[in-house]
Amino acid sequence: MKPEVDLWERYGPLFSIEEKLVFPPDHRELQFYSELRRRHPGSCMEIGAGDGRLAHILGNDSLTIGLEPSSVMFELWTPPARIGVSCVRGLGQQLPLRESCLDFILFPYNGIHCILDRDDRKTLLSEAARVLHPRGRFFAETCHRFDDREDEENAERYHYNKNGVSLRLVETVSHDRERGIISFDMEYSGSSVTEGSLSILLELALISTGELLHDIREAGMSILTIWGDYDCSPWDKRYSPRLLVLAERSEA
């Protein structure tokens, strides 16, 4: 099992609580992905489908696949989330699909940062190009601002306590420039942690815009659009909070 898969087997339930209870829903994000799916209604695969938070948006009458390496994450899917979506356990670096079989692949929510090795990320992009139809579309969301984030030590992020659910997060943030990663050393406590407290080390790759665009092109895709936020504003290196890339597989 790859280290990142083992991480999400442990971290997945806490991450799901955060997304469903601790933090308010990002309606701009949900609207963005709903509109993106409307524009690409054909066969689709979401890489890193997590606990199914986008499943109700992505599922339609066409083939829709939720690819997720963590079995624990799939256990968190609700029955409504599974409607119209085929759940497949696997890695984006080894897609269990034949060539040229999908119209649209998306890798949302900074998921590509979880793949620490650049060669592994290149393999994933090549796999995406392989299973897309000629002129099929690929979408990825990244955060180029991770590199700018300040280091912090033992910062309390939240202390959630509502309706019988309690969860507290204390976090240390640090950069390892030599390895090209940002680390989030997280200490969870509360009733939602069965062990009393749980330490999770989340490492994310620092991916520059130039590197990502180069690797997408090298995989056999051309860049169509680059947005800087969910409002589809143009990307700006200084001010954009995220990098949203839409690419197309070449016909050759």
Image (cartoon, rainbow, N blue to C red):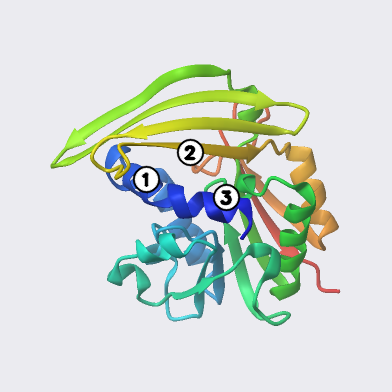
Q: Is residue 119 above or below residue 160?
A: below
Mark-to-mark CA distance, 3 and 2: 17 Å
Relative to 63, 182 lies left or right: right
Circles 1, 2 touching at the beta carbon (< 8 Å): yes
Helix or strand or loop: what does disc 2 sit on? Answer: strand
Q: Which of 141 and 122 lies nearest the eye of the viewer?
A: 122
Mark-to-mark CA distance, 1 and 3: 16 Å
Helix or strand or loop: what does disc 1 sit on? Answer: helix
Mark 1: amino acid = Leu
The answer to whether residue 136 shows anywhere in this view is: yes
Q: Disc 1 or 2, which lies upstream in sequence?
A: 1
Q: Is residue 27 above or below residue 150?
A: below
Q: Which of 227 and 212 lies nearest the eye of the viewer?
A: 212
Mark 2: amino acid = Ile
Is disc 2 surrounded by few (<14), some (14 to 19) or many (20+) residues within 10 Å? some
Instruction: Locate residue 37, reporting x and y percent.
Output: 49, 64
- Residue marked by disc 1: 14
Instruction: Locate residue 176, reporting x and y percent.
Output: 70, 27
Mark-to-mark CA distance, 1 and 2: 10 Å
The answer to whether residue 228 shows anywhere in this view is: no
Picture quadrant of residue 206: top right
Q: Disc 3 or 2, which lies upstream in sequence?
A: 3
Quadrant of the frame with the N terminus: bottom right
Mark 3: amino acid = Gly
Q: Is residue 77 above or below residue 228?
A: below
Relative to 179, 40 lies left or right: left
Q: Is residue 138 above or below residue 80?
A: above
Helix or strand or loop: what does disc 3 sit on? Answer: helix
Is disc 1 surrounded by few (<14), some (14 to 19) or many (20+) residues within 10 Å? some
Relative to 36, 123 lies left or right: right
- Residue marked by disc 2: 200
